Amino acid sequence: MQLENLNLNYWAIAPEIIASLTGVLLMLVDALQKKGARKLNAAVALIGIVLALLSVFRLGESANSAANVSGGYFGGMVVIDPIRIFFSVTILIVAIIATLMASQFVRDEGLPPGEFFTLLLFGTAGMLMLASAGDLVMVFLGLEIASITTYVMAGYRRYDARANESSLKYFLLGSFATAFLLYGMALVYGATGTTNIAAISAAINAGQISYRALLLVGAAMMLVGFGFKIATAPFHMWTPDVYEGAPTIVTGFMSTGPKAAVFAAFLRVFAAGFAGGAPGVGTDLHATWLTALAVIAAITMTAGNVIAISQKNIKRMLAYSSIAHAGYALVGFVTGEYASVAFYMLVYCVMSLGAFAVIQLLARAGDRKTEIADYAGIGFEAPGLTFSLSIFLLSLAGIPPTAGFMSKLFVFKTAWDAPYNLRWLVVVAVVNSIISIYYYLYPIVVMFFRPLAPGFVRPRVSVPAAIALIITLLGTLYLGILPNRVMNKMGSGSGAAQSAQTHVLNR
């Protein structure tokens, strides 16, 4: 391909460039500043993330440009569309909240701040690459950058054996899942002759598949790889141990940002790349992965919610909750409705990160207080934190008028109204939502209706941490009361996918 045909546009990757350069700058700043100084690290990281967020908003103006419609930028490696814009904003919001919380975390733990914020920035850059990927090669690069940084962050508390174990488990199992994903990509390339997602879709639509079985096996292996990254059953077994052992702020970060980024790539590959097709090729593939995802969604919701009931550690409980929420998001995924999935992931990221932020403050240095029994009677001793945690838990349960209720309503409604039979999946999802109310309400009962546990010390909340809590709390309420203002931003990006999917399944 000649250089002039690559459609080079460095503004199209401005968010990734800004996040990466800020990470490099932060390493220099950390090396040159006085030992023990920490405020400058967080400030530099926060400025870089905000600039990246502003560049995403600027990209939104060109989401429907002729250049992007004709094949994207850098030879189709990068695309700009509503999916990329919305998920990029979600990822950067997560990064901002995590940075605000991490400023207190590194101080309380006595850990080096420069490396932590650098890893956070590089991980954010990898997630942004996943959201913008228009090629399987870009998907792999973004996934590896995001994964490697989170492997290291999971074990950042180096003196803690639990964190070390968490990091090692995450690394070994993550590498194994990546091998599945990469080999699946290789098989898809062998079947279609391309790694470009739009070209893969075109080849399937035209029936230009060399080996149909190769394409099916490749798609199945990619499904395994993506399933591990978003923690769907039966690829979820790593989640509770890693979430419990990692520092709480890292748990909150890697349970939200990377999951949203992988969902963006997952949507683009399966709901766009593998959608449509000639009879006997693309139609069979599409119906196969659609059925598989519906079954996986049902198993994931059920496994996550049922096992969460028996958990006594609140981080493990939220780990299984995260698994269940991945299942809820898949309900919208199988309808091909981008807007409902994107909105669901935004809501999940805000309320889950808020819950982990409160847990970090209550657990104190070393995560010493993460058992639900440790929260006994603290409801009116630290009312700001406990009432905030109660709202986040109620939102995760889907209680109105919180954002969690509206996100589930949108996802379930799209599945119920789908032109193909998904009502059984909605029934499973609603039953699971009812089951989840028990374990979400249990910590609230313990906090407000049990005697005060001995040795309670009112946690200190720094100004950045307070700002992070306010952002997540207001976001949880705003997205629940006025969701249409956000949903309307995604509406134009979902119609095409919905109509294409309907056409295939009605053939």
Image (cartoon, helix red, strand yellow):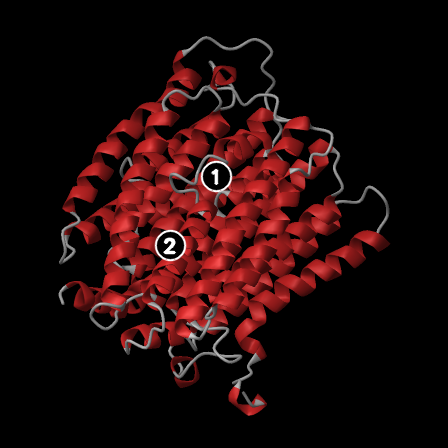
Q: Quadrant of the N terminus?
A: bottom right
| Disc 2 to disc 1, C-alpha distance | 35 Å
Residue ID at (59%, 30%)? 245
Of residues 183 and 119, which is closer to you in this image? Answer: 183
Of residues 466 and 90, which is closer to you in this image? Answer: 90
Give percent across and percent down for residue 270: 35, 61
The tally of labels here is: 2
Give percent across and percent down for residue 384: 49, 29
Give percent across and percent down for residue 467: 55, 43
Q: Are marks 2 and 1 in contact (CB under 8 Å)?
A: no
Residue 410 vs 503, above or below: the answer is above
Residue 68 vs 173, above or below: the answer is below
Residue 291 vs 460, above or below: the answer is below
Q: Residues within 10 Å of mark 1 (few under 14, many from 20)?
A: many
Residue 245 vs 4, above or below: the answer is above
Q: Is residue 274 visible?
A: yes
The residue labelled by disc 1 is 354
Q: Secondary structure at mark 1?
A: helix
The residue labelled by disc 2 is 220
Residue ID at (13%, 58%)? 419
Q: Amino acid at mark 1?
A: Gly
